């Protein structure tokens, strides 16, 4: 099986990505709490400022991950079109990154972001892999490896960060992630205990 790891090339592929996300999250008893809409698409306001990356089997996305930045990207207009076509309202948020909504220590969050001012940064998240492609974890390894390369080299991201369950934190170390200094374990929506991790270019 030869998969291609890349950005979506057109609006149709990005639309399929949001459908993939919804399908993956809706079938999981914990993750379905995080679904942003009741439609066939999982799409939220943070997608407006995100870079979207996927594993494609032909033209079909089978695995996905995004990095939310602090400004609009070349995908923004496509996201607006897809949300409008599906009558999905993307509400303006009062925070820049998703973790600011769920990490309990607001003081630490602001301090963490303040330290990164002047750098190109982003929050990694919304990982989704189609159930037929999860066996053996091969695609996850390839997706994360290709995604980190894309962030560091293609997009010149200086620091990427995101939440990671404590049980997977050791796994993500091999991709260059480490626990962000001062980040403490937290629980959100009854999901497994997690911590904020980061990678640097």
Image: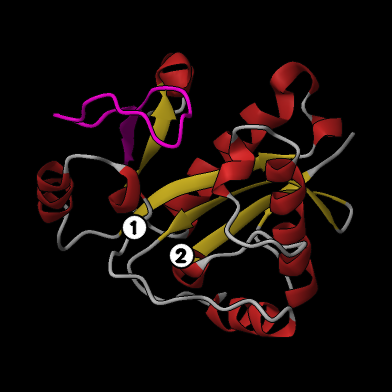
* Image height of 10 relative to 124, above or below: below
The answer to whether the residue labelled 1 contacts the one labelled 2, judged by CB atoms less than 8 Å apart, is yes
Total numbered labels placed on residues in the image = 2
**Camera-side residue: 24 or 50?**
24
Residue indicated by mark 1: 97
**Camera-side residue: 183 or 90?**
90
For residue 187, side relative to residue 61 (left or right): left
Question: Is tag 1's residue or tag 2's residue first in the polypeptide sequence?
Answer: 2
Q: Is residue 118 visible?
A: yes
Q: Residue 82: horizontal and vertical position, in percent?
A: 69, 78
* Image height of 185 relative to 196, above or below: above
At a point 52% along the width and 51% down the height, the residue shown is 150
For residue 126, side relative to residue 201 (left or right): right
Q: Tag 1, which secondary structure?
A: loop
At a point 17% along the width and 40% down the height, the residue shown is 105
Residue 195 counted in the magenta span: yes
Q: Tag 2, which secondary structure?
A: helix
Residue indicated by mark 2: 46
Residue 21 counted in the magenta span: no
Tag of residue 150: none
Question: What's drawn in magenta, residue-wise?
Answer: 178-201
**Camera-side residue: 71 or 5?**
71
For residue 127, side relative to residue 19 (left or right): left
């Amino acid at each position: 099986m030869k998969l291609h790891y890349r950005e979506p090339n057109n609006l149709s592929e990005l639309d399929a990505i949001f459908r993939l996300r919804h399908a993956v999250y809706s079938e999981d008893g914990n993750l379905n709490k995080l679904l942003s809409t009741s439609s066939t698409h999982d799409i939220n306001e943070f997608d407006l400022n995100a870079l979207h990356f996927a594993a494609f089997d032909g033209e079909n996305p089978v695995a996905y991950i995004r990095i939310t930045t602090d400004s609009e990207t070349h995908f923004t207009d496509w996201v607006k079109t897809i949300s409008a076509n599906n009558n999905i309202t993307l509400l303006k948020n009062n925070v820049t990154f998703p973790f600011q909504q769920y990490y309990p220590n607001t003081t630490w969050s602001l301090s963490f972001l303040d330290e990164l001012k002047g750098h190109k940064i982003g929050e990694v998240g919304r990982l989704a892999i189609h159930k037929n492609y999860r066996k053996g974890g091969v695609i996850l390894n390839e997706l994360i490896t290709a995604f980190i390369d894309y962030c560091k080299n293609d997009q010149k991201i200086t620091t990427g960060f995101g939440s990671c369950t404590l049980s997977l934190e050791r796994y993500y170390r091999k991709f260059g992630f480490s626990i962000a200094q001062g980040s403490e374990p937290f629980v959100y929506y009854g999901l497994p205990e997690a911590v904020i991790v980061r990678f640097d270019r």
